[in-house]
Amino acid sequence: MTMLSITAGPFSFRARLEEELAPATCAAFKALLPYEERVIHVRWSGEGVWIPMGDQEFALPWENTTRHPAPGEFIFYPKGVSETEILLAYGGVAFGSKAGPLAGNHFLTIVEGNENLRALGRMTLWEGAQSIRFGLE
């Protein structure tokens, strides 16, 4: 089991890569590590933050897909009718874009620090983009 450490804004989390359920997505993400970016609040999807990745292309299959990630679940959308992105749910999410409903690959799950998810989401909503860093433990 591969574990990641995540720092988002002032908060720390531990997360498990879902390698059995989304092996190709996990391998693609591991190749990016350590990964640093910023999260912004979602526009259409509800209570979530996301990392827009623009036109970056990842040749990924659909695996472990969901439109409704639970709080603490990350989904990876590898480009299609919308831009490439990573989304983290901190509350209720119905993943979508201006093009309509979307589904993404659930590839990473927070296992420690969940009590800070809502605070991260609210901080991002009211204070703007927050730094995020992913690294192998």
Image (tube, rainbow, N blue to C red):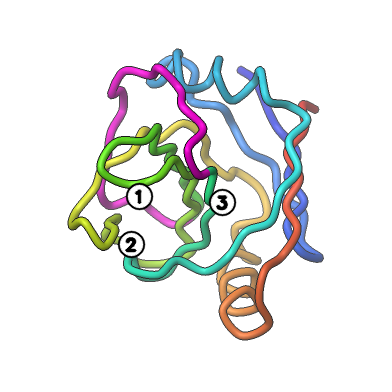
Quickly name the residue at label 2: 93
Which type of secondary structure does the marked residue at label 3 adopt?
strand
Name the N-terminal-most of marks 2 and 1. 1
- At mark 2, the secondary structure is strand
Q: Distance between the residues labelled 2 and 3?
A: 15 Å
- Badge 1 marks a residue whose secondary structure is loop
Which comes sooner in the sequence, label 2 or label 3?
3
Instruction: Tell me, for residue 69, which label it has, or none.
Output: 1
Packing grade of label 1 (10 A; few <14, some 14-19, many >=20) is many
Q: Which amino acid type is marked by label 2?
A: Val
Judge from the rendering whether residue 86 lies leftward or rightward of residue 134; answer left or right.
left
Check the picture and name the quadrant holding the C terminus.
Answer: top right
* Tag nearer the camera, 1 or 3: 3
Quadrant for the N terminus in the image: top right
Question: Which residue is identified by label 3?
Answer: 51
The dominant secondary structure in magenta is loop
Instruction: Kindly check if marks 2 and 1 are in contact, taking CB atoms under 8 A apart as contact.
Output: yes
The residue at the point 59 percent across, 31 percent down is 16
Distance from the alpha carbon under mark 1 to that under mark 3: 15 Å
Nearest the camera: 56 or 10?
56
